Image (tube, helix red, strand yellow):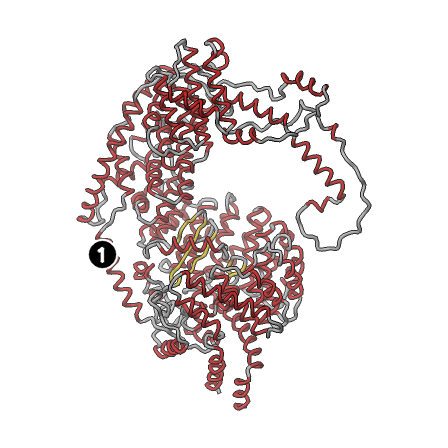
Amino acid sequence: MEQLKTIGRELAMGSQGGFGQSKEFLDLVKSIGEARSKAEEERIVLHEIETLKRRLAEPDIPKRKMKEYLIRLVYVEMLGHDASFAYIHAVKMTHDDNLVLKRTGYLAVSLFLNDDHDLIILIVNTIQKDLKSDNYLVVCTALNAVCKLINDETVPAVLPQVVELLAHQKEAVRKKAIMALHRFYQKSPSSVLHLVSNFRKRLCDNDPGVMGATLCPLFDLITIDVNTYKDLVVSFVSILRQVAERRLPKTYDYHQLPAPFIQIRLLKILAMLGSGDKQASEKMYTVVSDIFKKCDSTSNIGNAVLYECICCVSAIHPNPKLLDQAAQVISRFLKSDSHNLKYMGIDALGRLIKISPEIAEQHQLAVIDCLEDPDDTLKRKTFELLYKMTKSSNVEVIVDRMISYMISINDNHYKTYIASRCVELAEQFAPSNQWFIQTMNKVFEHAGDLVNVKVAHNLMKLIAEGFGEDDDTADSQLRSSAVESYLRIIGEPKLPSVFLQVICWVLGEYGTADGKYSASYITGKLCDVAEAYSNDETVKAYAVTAIKKIYAFEISAGRKVEMLPECQSLVEELSASHSTDLQQRAYELQAVIGIDAHAIESIMPSDASCEDVEIDKNLSFLDGYVQQAIEKGAQPYISENERTGMLNINNFRNQDQPEALSHSLRFEAYELPKPLVPSRVPPAAVASSTELVPVPEPYYARETHQTASLPSVSDAGSSELKLRLDGVQKKWGRPTYSSSASLTSTSSSHKTTNGVTQVDGVGTSNSKGRDTYDSRKPSVEISPEKQKLASSLFGGSSRTEKRASSGNHKVSKAAEKSHVGKAAGAHSDTVVEKINREPTPDLLDFSDLAVTSTAPSVDPFQQLEGLLDQTEATSTMNNGAAGASRTPEIMGLYADSAVSGLSSSVANRDEFNLSSELSNAARTSQVGVSQLNKGPNPKDSLEKDALVRQMGVNPTSQNPNLFKDLLG
Amino acid sequence: MLASFCGKKVMRELSGVILNRGSKLCNFIEWRGLKVVYKRYASLYFYMCIDQEDNELEVLEIIHQYVEILDRYFGSVCELDLIFNFHKAYFILDELLLAGELQDSSKRAVGHMIAIHDRFVEAVKEEANSISNLIAQVNM
């Protein structure tokens, strides 16, 4: 009987072509698989689309055919082509009474449409109907669709029904209803807030699956408001204890661990509830400690639970015993060979050092190993850790490392990220301003336009305002060292725009301040910049303004100004520029040169970029002019805000229905229309040109240029205002960052950076040396460089104190510029001393190390190890052949193997974890017992193979693994 | 927990990144602010985008759980099973993960639901399929 049934099925399948699919679909998949080029694949798919279009246009398509077409359409979309012509058919299929078709319809719809697609609204009605169905399978299908298709606007349409289903007699429905509510929370958090009591009830559900699912929405609610749920701590702890003591049915075991997924969810919730709450935390200590002891640390899932325990321990009120247990687990993670565990270890360490910073020191070498690992993921995670443990004592090493890594990568997204991290750390912990400027230079040079413009402005501000103390010598030294370094960098090709802006500004303000460089030298350099970056208007604007400033300072110093020929031609070119901003700057430059020293003194005093410029935002000096114009019959000016505001008011009044403005769907019928009440706000009431909302302050040149060049007749007044402001801004440099000027210069920074570049050369040769050294003496010994790096990262050396005394000039503090005149002499001493000390052996070592890190060092010994592992593992892999029979009655097998799974553990974990985890698996193989009833079953695999061949699908050279079992 | 249906462009770029990674490296990548966990089975890669606060090791095991269920359903699942029956793979995924979270961690519960659905399909099919009807009658 049983056999006959199987034969019958196979016969039925044969007519369809195997794998339960039609011949046509199989042919399609086959031809795509055999396509030799992208173009060929394209052709096949386009042909398929044509066929489907034709077929769908035919009248009276049998439903089963329709289902197949839909699946083929989904396949076409999966290959990246558009099947939007058929979306409506998918929507139609969801209306079908037959569950199989309905399910396929919902699947196709959820794969085709985003939750904000226009067609979704057609489905909401169907979903509502299906949620009421007597057949619980239909309800389940509808709930699945709810999770994928309902958006924040349609939530209210199905919410009441979903809530009702929380009390459904079938646990599968209850579970899905809970998950749907969890999704609603994600879509619109406020929609489920009132359901707290329902969730609490479900937490005590008879079915452990429902209880487990309830933890999801409860987690959501607890994130919003912890305090309301403190009473649940006891329940959660007791559930966790029961789970850990294996009180749940055996079917929830996973790799011999009792319901690990539920444990993890509970630990996450406990971490939130116990955070900052000693009383609540004390209730958790025992159970967490028990889990630490009980958890099987050899399986992956065991480690997942342990990691979650660490997260919990580091979040709740600290307990020494638990911290100790956590530290032990972390050290095991870090010592593991598996990269995954190392990664988790680094992450866990980052969490724990917030509470007990001292544990970082035990693991310093492991951390440095991870930092030097070729695996980018691990490296980035380690930077994350270093970022968390940065202090003023180790900021130099860490930022140095970050920069050299930043230089080595191409990924712009991460480059931006790490650049901002560098800037943040440098701003927060910079030991000296020189170091800060040098670091910023490096960041700008390599990350360029990825850096936030604000950072550039901060840098200019720092250079202008100098140290927090009123110490002019130090400030001028700082400035001249900046000028010095910029003059050197300026010649390099392809500098990023933001950096050039900083350079131009600084050269304009301080280029000639210390008298070391002549005006013609600096202006020559600036002209070169404007010429070399001729398509960057912002840079050109900065350059021209800088030139103007230099000439202005020359004139006010009583020297005669002779314009360079290239400068002359630049000004001529710019005064004919398409950009009004550049034009204006050029004309201003010409005007400034023409006036006498006294006038210049008052419009452009030197050393005044920090002085506040008072801007009369009301433009009261124009009142007379405006009055005159109005008398002549001009329209009074109405600000833009008020004009648009009036429009809004009109709309509002006309519709007379406040809800109409909010963007949500209404599910109840509209009210009957009321007669309109025409009402208008008289425009004159609003207009008064003096108290208008001020023109947004120009932020940087390009922006101003755009607003200024917008020609609009009705706007004449405002555009004039903008132009005026523009003029003001240019006279004073950046008004937002108006900074002071005073100058002097020593060549200190020049020397130091020179030192660094020289060192770079030494560094590379050193790194080579180290590699060979390593290969001779495999891994056991720790290289002195590493130890040095460790000590500089994790502190403990005498350097700390030295830095502490000279450091701590926080930039933010400096920005405030307190006018306390004291200790000027003493301070300048330390600065000079520091400058001299800059190229000391310490620093040399660091830059040296930075270089070694970028060169990926290969350890031959480790490679050999890898090879050994691989051979060992492939031999075990071989016996993992195809298992289990192909009959559709898998459920029989299911029940069987679930019971026998534990005993019949022929296959060890190696068979699942392919080469990606080889070395790791070798360790765990003895213990990690799989529940899969697998093993060599040649007969079945032969059968399968035969079936496949029958269909005429042959493995192609392109994809030799096509027929390999996934797990074998 | 996961954003399963990311755009096609994302998928393409992401697969480029994942395929280039060596086999001994982490199964996690941080990519454009997303955290991605992937696992390789023979020539197939399964990957999941997860939230910052999610437990990566747990996600690896969720992927494994899914593959185990697929394996049991198809009987030594292979790539072709998934290509030809991708809609079934989706149905199974719906029973395991919903709203981005594991809806039930018991393999048995998941398997049960899939089986019930299949039995339903079978019932419909048997009605329509005359051959199997015939055989059934012969056996009566």
Outermost residue to the left: A776
Question: Looking at the image, can residue A805 be seen?
Answer: no
| Chain where mark 1 sits | A
Q: Position of residue A619 (x, y in %)?
A: 62, 20
Which secondary structure lies at badge 1?
A: helix
Task: Return the residue at label 1.
Answer: A864
Residue A782 or residue A568, whichever sits in front: A568
Image mark count = 1
Residue located 41% across and 25% down the image: A504
Q: Specify whether A211 is left or right of A566.
A: right
Question: Looking at the image, can residue A301 be seen?
Answer: yes
Q: Position of residue A835 (x, y in %)?
A: 30, 23
Q: Specify whether A594 is left or right of A362.
A: right
Kind of residue at badge 1: Leu
Q: Quadrant of the C terminus of chain A?
A: bottom left
Q: Specify whether A928 is left or right of A122.
A: left
Q: Position of residue A731 (x, y in %)?
A: 50, 19
Residue A922 or residue A115, whichever sits in front: A115
Q: Position of residue A154 (x, y in %)?
A: 64, 55
Outermost residue to the right: A675
Residue located 72% across and 28% down the image: A686
Q: Is residue A106 above or below residue A17?
A: above
Q: Quadrant of residue A380?
A: top left
Q: Is residue A479 above or below residue A340?
A: above
Residue located 54% across and 31% down the image: A706
Residue A890 or residue A531, whichever sits in front: A531
